[in-house]
Image: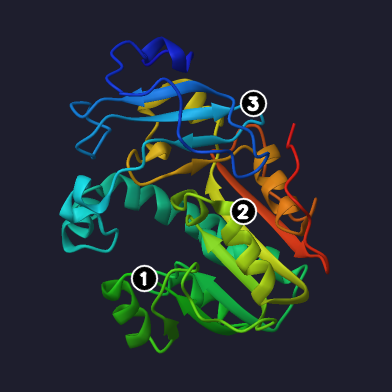
Amino acid sequence: MASASPQNANTALELDQASPTRTCCVCGHSRFRLLHHWDPAHLRNVATIPVAFWACECGIALLDPIPTAQQLPETGDWWSPHRKEIYRNVWFKHIRIRIQNSLFGNARSRLIRQTQKVMPSGRLLDIGCGTGSLLKEASKFYDCTGLEPSDRAADAAESAGFQVIRSTVENAQIPDDAFDVVTMDAVLEHVPDPVAVLQQIHRILRPGGIVVIKVPKLWGPSHRRHGREWNGFRVGYHLTMFTGKTLSAALEVAGFAPLSQPSRDRWLDDILVLWGRQQPVSRTRTSAA
């Protein structure tokens, strides 16, 4: 079993730096400590360079250096045939998920039901919509659009009948006040500056609109147990990791009021889900401490 103390595993650092080159997107500070590192030979590191997560004093963790596309495998696209084949072979995971879904409904339907409590209807944008799984659930209640940079995934979502904007959120040409709900399921951890992305979402939401964010939970039970071996890091692809406190702080800095209900930030959860309501005036970046 891996040590419960993440620092104990950091024994063979090959980084060419003693501190990250990034500044914290939440508190604006540059005071970090090394949280975890992986050299290129480590099984969890898919990049061809050594990488590390650095913990800011406010609690957020940032990957630095960030691998370039050339330093990541060609099979990195989540929707590649190679990755689908790997997932297809994890038969025991399918069985567990089917049992959970039969008892409680699937995770996407639960997410939409909870979102309806604060925004029952309207226009919904799913950022990183993939093949349209969340759109399928959301379309029962909302007028839905997806946003997806992967052509493979966008093709599948469009084939299922959904309108898809083929872009990243940073580059998408979306008018102001266009949507009532924006969802991001396993997306925000992939961007280097999540506050900038949240500010874009603030712009495209109508006054009082809702953003829904689902991310892996830093310092959840699996991270505490497995340390740097936790698969939630998805080393090389996940760039920013959150606790409940730092995700709430990021929302506030971007101009949102985090909602206490619904929420999912329980001690035993490995997944963090937060809802935020758009506020009329954006706030400046302040410390999350």
Res 57 label = 3
What residue did someone put label 1 on?
149
* Residue 198, position as x, y percentages in the image: 62, 60
- Vertical order, 16 against 278 (above or below): above
9 relative position to 79: left or right: right
Q: Quadrant of residue 233?
A: top left
Q: Secondary structure at mark 2?
A: helix
Q: Is residue 258 visible?
A: no
How far apart marks 3 and 1 lie (CA) works out to 33 Å
For the residues labelled 1 and 2, the Cα–Cα distance comes to 20 Å
Decide: marks 1, 2 in contact (CB < 8 A)? no
Q: Are marks 3 and 1 in contact (CB under 8 Å)?
A: no
In the image, is residue 33 above or below residue 124?
A: above
- Residue 55, how many percent across, how many down? 54, 27
- Image spot of residue 166 (x, y percent): 38, 78
Q: Nearer the viewer, residue 180 or 224?
A: 180
Whether residue 199 is visible, yes or no, is yes
Q: Amino acid at mark 3?
A: Glu
Q: Residue at x 72, y 47 (%)?
A: 285
Q: Decide which of 271, 90 is in the foreground and name it.
A: 271
